[in-house]
Image: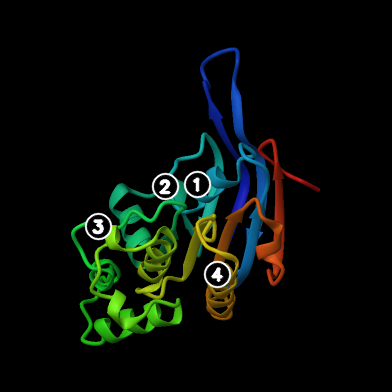
Amino acid sequence: MFQVNNLSMIYDVNTDSKTYALKGIDLSLPDKGLIGIIGPSGSGKSTLMYCLSTLKEPTEGSIVYNDIEITGVTGSERERLRRREFGFIFQKHYLVPYMSALDNVMVASVDGRSDTVAKASGLLTELGLSEKEFSKKPAKLSGGQCQRIAIARAMINDPKVLFADEPTASLDHANAFNVMSMLKKYSEERLVIVITHDRSILKDADRVIEIWDGEISK
């Protein structure tokens, strides 16, 4: 699904003190499975995710996704990929404050299907929210509940690739385990990429990629 060749992200590129966030990354990723990308803060793991998902443009190298060179596509094509094929879970939930939990999930739906309410409700239930919490706004919910709503929102369109940047950072142990179980199940048919510094949540990963100082550890 992804073929990455000689990928670099360089800051201060026109100065003598270049900073490499990524340096010469070569990587192949399949069309399904749970892939963990792990490394300390500042190692480049999140930058790699942003490049794969078209949120950042690399300085050098290429990324091919399903036979499409995505480092060279137009802005509208990037937007289509992000809405139709990619799903995102970030450390911060970025929920719409004036919308209910259920509406925050449904607002991301791109097809307007008649079963969207049922699907959104099912995802929230599977993630441990009760029906009475569906109508609550983010300010009335805990940080962990808001993060689970954001996870449901990321899954509402059945994306082919789910990018998760520290998805369990705000969750207690039980809910973190539940979320990772859901992501593992989802990865049976789709590709799930989890960025983390916590190796314990990757115990069921199909592959773990370690990054140090912008390079994949051999």
Residue at x-position 55% and y-position 75% = 178
Rounded to the nearest angstrom, the CA distance separating label 1 from label 2 is 6 Å
Q: Are marks 3 and 2 in contact (CB under 8 Å)?
A: no
Q: Which residue is mark 2?
A: 55
| Mark 1 Cα-neighbour bin, 10 Å: few <14, some 14–19, many ≥20 | many
147 relative to 3 in the view: left or right? left
Rounded to the nearest angstrom, the CA distance separating label 4 from label 3 is 27 Å
Q: Are marks 1 and 2 in contact (CB under 8 Å)?
A: yes
Sequence-earlier tag: 2 or 4: 2
Mark 3 vs mark 2, foreground winner is 3
Q: Are marks 3 and 1 in contact (CB under 8 Å)?
A: no
Q: Which residue is mark 1?
A: 51
Give the amino acid type for the residue marked by disc 3 in the picture. Val
Sequence-earlier tag: 3 or 1: 1
| Mark 2 Cα-neighbour bin, 10 Å: few <14, some 14–19, many ≥20 | some
Q: Position of residue 11 (x, y in %)?
A: 53, 26
Rounded to the nearest angstrom, the CA distance separating label 2 from label 4 is 18 Å
Rounded to the nearest angstrom, the CA distance separating label 3 from label 1 is 25 Å
Residue at x-position 69% and y-position 45% = 211
Residue 36 placement: quadrant: bottom right
Residue at x-position 58% and y-position 80% = 188
Q: Residue furthest right?
A: 218
Residue 29 placement: quadrant: bottom right
Sequence-earlier tag: 3 or 2: 2
Q: Which residue is mark 4?
A: 191
Residue at x-position 42% and y-position 71% = 159
Give the amino acid type for the residue marked by disc 1 in the picture. Cys
Mark 3 vs mark 1, foreground winner is 3
Q: Which residue is mark 3?
A: 96
